[in-house]
Amino acid sequence: MARIAGIDLPNKPIEIALTYIYGVGRSNAIDICKKANIKLGVRTNDLSEHEINELRKVLENEYLIEGRLRTEIQLNIKRLMDIGSYRGLRHRKGLPVRGQRTKTNARTRKGKRKTVAGKKK
């Protein structure tokens, strides 16, 4: 089992296995394979050490993945909150950021319902 960027890649075709790394999707995986001169469809266990090292070099030098990508995303969200932008306020309040409705739905973002008692006489 190949280990790249702290992730154990499963024995699947390499363009699928690379998607197990945070920040690498299908199109990026195919580009990475082309840059590392690895044929598509080769299974992870069939890769040589040289090919695995080529993959590591390409990923380290040209892509933000795993921890560095997560950190950058968090810093971007923090920046939005610090400057007080609309998107930052939505993040701070835990509401949907991209214009979705909140009267109904939005339960994933808002959390469990908080019941408000009716007016008593």
Image (tube, helix red, strand yellow):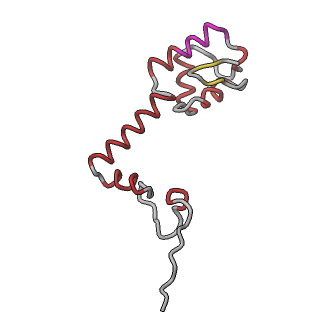
Image-based side of 47 in relation to 120, left or right: right
Picture residue at 61% right of the left edge, 13% below the top: 52
Q: Position of residue 89 (x, y in %)?
A: 34, 55
Image-based side of 6 in relation to 91, left or right: right
Query: Between residues 117 and 77, which one lies in front from this camera angle?
Result: 117
Picture quarter containing residue 7?
top right
Query: Between residues 112 and 59, which one lies in front from this camera angle?
Result: 112
25 within the magenta span: no
Picture quarter containing residue 36?
top right
Q: Position of residue 5 (x, y in %)?
A: 56, 21
Q: Which secondary structure dominates the residues rendered in magenta?
A: helix
Taking the view exactly as shown, the residue that stands out farthest to the left is 83
Image-based side of 42 in relation to 109, left or right: right
Image-based side of 48 in relation to 27, left or right: right
Taking the view exactly as shown, the residue that stands out farthest to the front is 121
Up/down of 120 relative to 72, above or below: below
Picture residue at 50% right of the left edge, 75% below the top: 116
Q: In this picture, which residue range is highlighted in magenta?
A: 48-56
Up/down of 75 relative to 88, above or below: above
Question: What quarter of the picture does the N terminus occupy?
Answer: top right
Q: Position of residue 47 (x, y in %)?
A: 68, 13
Picture residue at 51% right of the left edge, 61% below the top: 106
Q: Position of residue 11 (x, y in %)?
A: 73, 23
Taking the view exactly as shown, the residue that stands out farthest to the bottom is 121
- How many labels were placed on the picture? 0
